[in-house]
Amino acid sequence: MYDWKTLGESAWKVRGNAHLHGKTAVGAAVLSAQGNIYTGCNVEHRFRAHDVHSEVNALTTMTAAGDGPAVAVVIAAERDRFTPCGGCLDWIFELGGPTCTVAFQGQPGGKFDTLRADELMPHYPC
């Protein structure tokens, strides 16, 4: 359905630009309904309350370009398991909706774990 390979490669590429104070670099690629790809990485601040997560970075870049809604979000991080935090899920619902597909890839070229946003947060107040 989606070009997962291209989305994954895009997320891994931008992950290399992450600005870290912690230990987990994260990249994200967002596919808009128009077929455009937007990327973002986590940008951490020494005052951690100001961190920008990769998913929000990519989603807001899509919005700044005048595009949307998001239909898929791919997250790339060297972890065994990973899901967006509650704040990032709020943004996914806001700019993609409950049927937006959220995928995680734990290594370049690895398998994708995919769920819809409403499966990750089944009781979200839509």
Image (cartoon, rainbow, N blue to C red):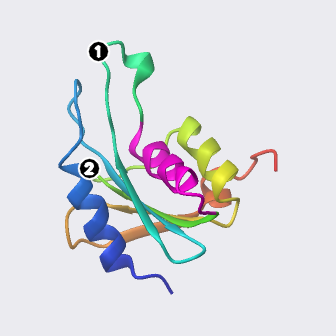
Residue holding disc 2 = 79
Q: Between residues 6 and 121, which one lies in front from this camera angle? A: 6
**Front label number (2 vs 1):** 1
| Residue at image coords 51%, 87% | 1
Distance CA(mark 2)–CA(mark 1): 23 Å
Relative to 17, say whether 112 is above or below.
below
Three-letter residue code for mark 1: Arg
| Residue at image coords 62%, 63% | 68
Question: Which quadrant would residue 76 be assigned to in this image?
Answer: bottom left
Three-letter residue code for mark 2: Arg
Question: Which quadrant would residue 117 be assigned to in this image?
Answer: bottom right
Q: Percent position (x, y) of residue 22? A: 23, 26
Q: Between residues 38 and 121, which one lies in front from this camera angle? A: 38
Residue placed furthest toward the top? 47
**Does residue 46 appear left or right of residue 17 in this picture?**
right
**Does residue 124 appear left or right of residue 50 in this picture?**
right
**Does residue 90 appear left or right of residue 101 in this picture?**
right
Relative to 10, say whether 3 is above or below.
below
**Is residue 106 visible to the viewer in this orientation of the structure?**
no
Q: Is residue 65 magenta?
A: yes
Q: Magenta stretch?
A: 53-68
Q: Secondary structure at mark 1?
A: loop
Q: Percent position (x, y) of residue 90? A: 64, 42
Residue holding disc 1 = 46
